[in-house]
Amino acid sequence: MTELLAERVARRAAENPETTAVVSARETVDYGRFWSRVTRTAAGLDGMNRVAVLPTSDVGSLVAVTAAMHAGVSVVLLHRHLLPAQLTRVLELSKPGAVVAASHQHARLRRLGFDGTVETAESLESDGAADRARPDTELLVGITSGTTGEPKLFVRNQRSWATTLDRSDATFDIGRGDRVAVPGVLDHTHFLYGALHGLTRGATVDLRPVAHSLRDAATHLYSVPTIAWDVVRSGIGPVGSVREVLSSAARWPRTGRQALQEVLPNASLVHFYGASELSFVSFDRGLGA
């Protein structure tokens, strides 16, 4: 049976505990420290069915999500564009045992009308052990919604994401020693998945703005068209270290791909086709038509 997501990260931590796991604007942690925080946070989640997380580009967000997936607690993935009524409805429908966000995001949740306790990954840490996830355990509750109207929830299980990880392993050249730039906010499933996949491969995940990660020899870049344009307009480059750009959202026009290729001359440009409910269904490489 294929390994589940958290099992893969645990194996990388055991193999190379001193390798840098995550770099953010505020801190850098190695795999040993990252996994220690994951297991302690997972212990604090023990007994819950779901936990709502409003992630940002910080280590604690990745710890909280990985801990939940390790403990078999489903992650209700909140995002910053929810309206107050939508947030209320999502929490009513999903019934999480806790709401988690980085400290600097607590005021945002208050503005959205949430008046309950807001935890952080650190505040959840506990001694003891947590249950382990099973393949059929619910892993993620995602939200699709426009700017108005009823939010729609979708569910992914552990086996579903493990299968997608296997597909990514076979398709993309990411491994130990690589540096995966994930400059988008982690409430976007494309970027959350990119960060988690990088951790399952033993790579260093860089959550900082794209200019910082490119200057520090990123080998892979998770992108959307707005970030790609930022790269083109930044005046950085050429940057020869990047081998793959993994993009989603609207397909970039050929002229845009050509401009990005000039900045990242050694990169294979890969575009995902799919949806959050399915992960990627197909992809293409190169400049395209």
Image (tube, rainbow, N blue to C red):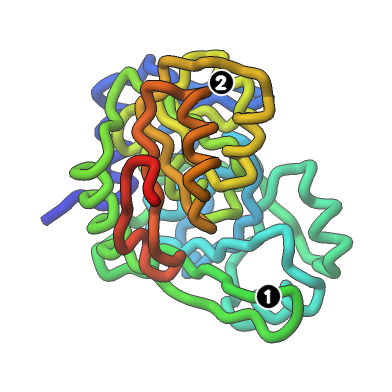
Residue 11, placed above or below residue 157: above
Which residue, as the protein is rendered here, is positioned at the far right? 111
Who's the residue at 85% across and 60% down the image?
110
Residue 20, placed above or below residue 168: above
Disc 2 residue type (three-letter): Thr
Q: Residues within 10 Å of mark 2 (few under 14, many from 20)?
A: some
Provide the residue designation for mark 2: 28
- Quick one: 94 or 282, which is closer to the camera? 282
With 119 as the anchor, is 168 left or right in this view? left
Is label 2 in a helix, a strand or a loop?
Answer: strand
| Residue contact between numbered discs 1 and 2, judged by CB atoms under 8 Å | no
Where in the figure is residue 92, as x and y percent of width and height? 66, 81
Is label 1 in a helix, a strand or a loop?
Answer: loop
Provide the residue designation for mark 1: 146
- Quick one: 109 or 71, which is closer to the camera? 109
What whole-number distance in Å separates the C-alpha atoms at marks 1 and 2? Answer: 35 Å
With 67 as the anchor, is 185 left or right in this view? right
Where in the figure is residue 254, as x and y percent of width and height? 47, 45
Which residue, as the protein is rendered here, is positioned at the far left? 1
Disc 1 residue type (three-letter): Gly
Q: Quadrant of residue 60?
A: top right
- Quick one: 246 or 3, which is closer to the camera? 246
Q: Earlier in the sequence, mark 1 or mark 2?
A: 2
Where in the figure is residue 93, as x and y percent of width and height? 60, 82
Who's the residue at 54% across and 78% down the image?
153
Where in the figure is residue 272, as x and y percent of width and height? 39, 54
Can residue 126 be seen at all in this image of the molecule? Answer: no
Q: Quadrant of residue 140?
A: bottom left
- Quick one: 128 or 48, which is closer to the camera? 48
